[in-house]
Amino acid sequence: MSTLAGRTALVTGASRGIGKEIALELARQGATVRCVATSAKNCEATVAEITALGGAATGHGANVGDSAAVEELIKEVGAVDILVNNAGITRDTLLMRMSEEDWSAVLQINLTSAFLLAKGLSRPMMKARFGRIINVSSVIGVHGAAGQANYAASKAGLIGLTKSLAKELGSRGITCNAVAPGFISTDMTHELSEEMRTGILERTPLGRLGEPGDIAGVIAFLASDAAGFVTGQVIEVDGGLFV
């Protein structure tokens, strides 16, 4: 059953990892997907996979942390029904060693991009009296982590943005929710030491790292009509790590 047939979704950071799987899952559910990465070329593999599934998708390149680039992107893609703010970077180091550049870069891509896209794309949603805004936060934004002050602040900021937009936009039929992944098997977690990985698995009741599909499934639900009465929520998808 195509639960998102007739809907158009925009997914940032759609070239790999969680973002790619989100784009694929939304397409499987019937949505037309606008895949966004730093360049349209980076989205080619995602678009090709969606097309092979019989879905519809286009690739777009933009620095989503830059207001002028986001403005051009919105002109290019037009109105969407579903916005998934997934783009994110890390520049990990202890606070005493963190440069202002590393702080600003992470906040710009992880948080400011969500503000810019939500601001621009919520206008047509308001006119249509329907919309789904889904922000990909992190359990680090809820619980913090040493060496990730910039990343934690950006992901915590997404949670505050989510709750505020839920209150502002709810009367226009727009829901806004956040998904907070735990440790997911992506390029980021592949860099973990064996000791860290073992420690995480020992503390996780489900005994494994998550897969991108575990996040994509929750986002597909939040994008659907079935989640029409769910807004302002932060759903931790972490295998029980922080129970």
Image (tube, rainbow, N blue to C red):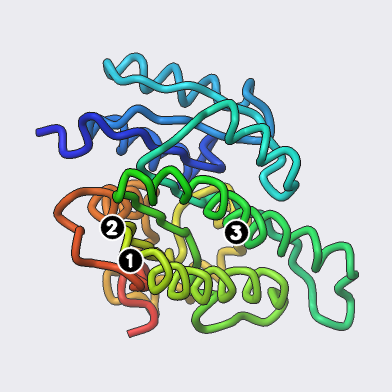
Residue drawn at x 46%, y 73% as measured from the top left: 200
Viewer-proximal residue among 2 and 176: 176
* Element carrying mark 2: loop
Viewer-proximal residue among 134 and 241: 134
Viewer-proximal residue among 190 and 47: 47
Q: Nearer the viewer, mark 3 or mark 2?
A: 2
Question: Residue 130's x, y, as percent?
Answer: 29, 49
Location of residue 43 (image quadrant): top right
Viewer-proximal residue among 25 and 77: 77
Closer to the chain start, of discs 3 and 1, is 3
Report which residue position mark 3 lands on. Answer: 115
Question: Residue 203's x, y, as percent?
Answer: 39, 80
The amino acid type found where label 2 is placed reads Gly
Report which residue position mark 1 lands on. Answer: 170
The amino acid type found where label 1 is placed reads Gly
The residues tagged by marks 2 and 1 sit, at their Cα atoms, a distance apart of 5 Å
Q: Residues within 10 Å of mark 3 (few under 14, many from 20)?
A: some
Residue drawn at x 30%, y 20% as measured from the top left: 55
Residue drawn at x 54%, y 42% as measured from the top left: 12
Q: Residues within 10 Å of mark 1 (few under 14, many from 20)?
A: some
